[in-house]
Amino acid sequence: MNKKIPNFVFTNQFGLLCLVVIFVIIFSTVTDGFTSRFNIFALSRVVAIDIMIGLAMMVVILTGGLNLALGAIGVCAAMFGGWCMETMGIPVIPSIFLILGMGSFLGWVNGMITVKTGVHSFIVTLATMSIYFGLMTMLTEAEAFRRLPESFTDFGSMKLFNKYVSPLLLLSLATCCVLFYLFKYTDIGRKLIAAGANPDAAELSGISVNHMFIYCHMLSGFLGAIAAIMLTTRIGAAIPSMAGQLGMDWLLPAFLAPVIGGTLLSGGKLSVFGTMLGAILVTLITNGLYLIDVGEFWIRFFLGIILLIAVLLDKTREFFTLKSVIVS
């Protein structure tokens, strides 16, 4: 009697997990330092932030939209937190809440403009990306905040599990669990998915689609602010260029993780753990290519190819599968 092969074997997550294992084996074989304690710890700090920004983009893609202002929101939130702690002398814990509030507020602005104007979030967030970054640069005069409390910055340099793992990674994994529970088992989570899957049907069933879209943008800003806190503790300062010009350095990993992970670009289907595995895969590949001394240009080229393949796979998934309400 043949055993039934578990459904998990046929999922996108299983395929990603296999790819992660394959690339770990490859880079462990062809490089000397890939499995060193130093590199694994560095990887855990980088992948933690990539997971968080991937999740932040995922919740907006759920609505069929995009958040190009994610990096700008993160930098603005980080700089605001630096101002609160260094200039105003506000204690760390209240400052963290203020940072999260700032990220949520900027996300709310994105959502409000999107639903009130009917303009696609791609255009709206492209505009607010420049607006947020420009305002932040003007108000701070592009000056970094480097004298942050040690009780805040020490978190990013802590080493756990025999100095192999950063607590930042544990924070990202915990966030994945919270979001999985939110979308799988709560009423608001199911409403968010329903609004993204079929806005007209959701509206007819009594769901305020506009409110759901705004909530998704607010959640994206909130998660972006968490990523900003993590990055600030990692580098020990709040710097205007911490996510690149206009926050552009966040966009490619933020977009790659959910799309590779199985979140449909058309909305209505997401994968929390797929996004996590997608972020891990992208970070592993980038780190491994750096270690074998591949140039920055070729790494960008390779990631661009992965993105193109991921988008084509997304269209294939959308064509061959029903847009059912699925959370994984």
Image (cartoon, rainbow, N blue to C red):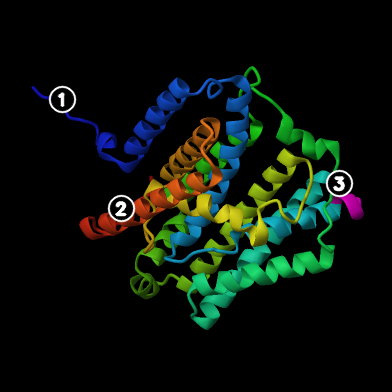
Q: CA distance from mark 1 to mark 3?
A: 58 Å
Q: What amino acid does circle 1 point to?
A: Lys
Q: Which residue is mark 3?
A: 91
Image coordinates for residue 255, horizontal then vertical, percent:
48, 54
Q: Secondary structure at mark 3?
A: loop
Mark 1 vs 3, N-terminal side: 1
Name the residue nearer the viewer: 242 or 109. 242
Q: Secondary structure at mark 2?
A: helix
Image coordinates for residue 293, horizontal then vertical, percent:
54, 34
Task: Determine the residue positioned at 47% across, 41% down.
Answer: 282
- Report whether 81 appears left or right of 297: right
Task: Determine the residue positioned at 39% across, 62% down.
Answer: 267
Indicate the quadrant containing the C terminus: top left, top right, bottom left or bottom right: top left
The quadrant holding residue 148 is: top right
Q: What amino acid does circle 3 point to?
A: Pro
Graded by Cα atoms within 10 Å as few (under 14), some (14 to 19) or many (20 or more), the crowding at tag 2 reads: some
Image coordinates for residue 201, horizontal then vertical, percent:
33, 72
Q: For residue 89: magenta?
A: yes
Task: Determine the residue positioned at 62% across, 27% down.
Answer: 41
Graded by Cα atoms within 10 Å as few (under 14), some (14 to 19) or many (20 or more), the crowding at tag 3 reads: some
| Part of the protein shown in magenta | 85-91
Q: Which residue is mark 1?
A: 3
Report if the CB atoms under discs 2 and 1 are less than 8 Å apart. no
Q: Which residue is mark 2?
A: 313
Name the residue nearer the viewer: 39 or 31. 31
Report if the CB atoms under discs 1 and 3 are less than 8 Å apart. no
